[in-house]
Image: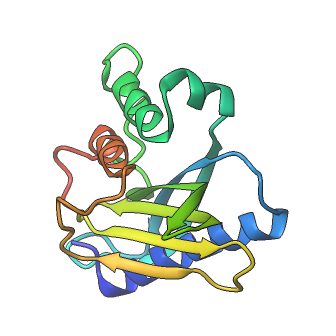
C-alpha cells in the first residue's frame, strides 16, 4: 500500500508534468508517463527517495490508427502481455518500483453552450487510486482530484488502458 507521502509525491510529479506542458505551449502530442520510485527502505515500510518519470510521446498518426487515446493505451498493454514481446519486469530485482501510469493530453470541454480547451493529466497508481488534473487554457493552475475509491460509473476514459498497463508491469510475487 502506498503511503500518504508517496501519493503526495505522485501528485507533485503529475503537477510538474502539467507545468512542463504549459511551459512548452498548447498543441503538443499526448504523452504516456511511467512513474517509478527509488526506495530508501524495503517493504513493509518503503519510503520513496525520488520518483522517476519516463515520458513517451504518443504520435498523432498512431492515435488515429488505433482509434483514440483510450484504445492506444489498451493496445500498448496488450502488446506487452505477449510473452515474446514482454521486456523483463523493471519493478522487481532492481532499485525501481512501479508506482503509477499516467497520460497527459489536450481536449475540449463542453459545458452548456461554451467550449473550452483543456489539458488533462490522468493517472492510476498501484493501489487503484485515480488522479485527475484538469487545466483550462489560460488558467494559472489546474484542478486536482484524487479519488481513493473511484466510482466505476464515473471513471475517466483512459482508466481501462492505464489499469491494463499497470497489470502488465505489476510484479506478481513482490509485495505492493
Residue 99 in percent (x, y) is at: 38, 61
Where's the C terminus, which quadrant? Answer: bottom left
- Give the image's coloring scheme: rainbow
Going by the image, does 42 lie left or right of 39?
left
Report if residue 151 is visible in the image.
Answer: yes
Q: Quick one: 3 or 56, which is closer to the camera? A: 56
Where's the N terminus, which quadrant? Answer: bottom left
- The residue drawn where x is 41% and y is 27% is 75
Residue 39 in percent (x, y) is at: 42, 70
- The residue drawn where x is 64% and y is 69% is 18
Residue 145 in percent (x, y) is at: 40, 79
- The residue drawn where x is 59% and y is 80% is 142
Going by the image, does 151 lie left or right of 110?
left
Instruction: Relative to 77, say whether 128 is above or below.
Output: below
Could you say which quadrant of the image residue 42 lies in?
bottom left
Q: Quick one: 132 or 117, which is closer to the camera? A: 117
Going by the image, does 83 lie left or right of 63?
left
Residue farthest to the front? 113
Residue farthest to the right? 24
Could you say which quadrant of the image residue 117 lies in?
bottom right
Amino acid at each position: 500500500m502506498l503511503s500518504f507521502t508517496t501519493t503526495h509525491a505522485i501528485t507533485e510529479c503529475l503537477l510538474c508534468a502539467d507545468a512542463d506542458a504549459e511551459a512548452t505551449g498548447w498543441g503538443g502530442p499526448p504523452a504516456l508517463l511511467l512513474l517509478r520510485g527509488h526506495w530508501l527502505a524495503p517493504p513493509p515500510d518503503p519510503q520513496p527517495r525520488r520518483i522517476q518519470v519516463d515520458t513517451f510521446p504518443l504520435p498523432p498518426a498512431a492515435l488515429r490508427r488505433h482509434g483514440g487515446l483510450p484504445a492506444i493505451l489498451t493496445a500498448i498493454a496488450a502488446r506487452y502481455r505477449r510473452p515474446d514481446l514482454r521486456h523483463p519486469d523493471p519493478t522487481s530485482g532492481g532499485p525501481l518500483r512501479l508506482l503509477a501510469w499516467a497520460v497527459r493530453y489536450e481536449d475540449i470541454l463542453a459545458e452548456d453552450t461554451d467550449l473550452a480547451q483543456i489539458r488533462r493529466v490522468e493517472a492510476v497508481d498501484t493501489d487503484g487510486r485515480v488522479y485527475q488534473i484538469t487545466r483550462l487554457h489560460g488558467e494559472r493552475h489546474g484542478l486536482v482530484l484524487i479519488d481513493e475509491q473511484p466510482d466505476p460509473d464515473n471513471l475517466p476514459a483512459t482508466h481501462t488502458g492505464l489499469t491494463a498497463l499497470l497489470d502488465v508491469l505489476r510484479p506478481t510475487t513482490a509485495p505492493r
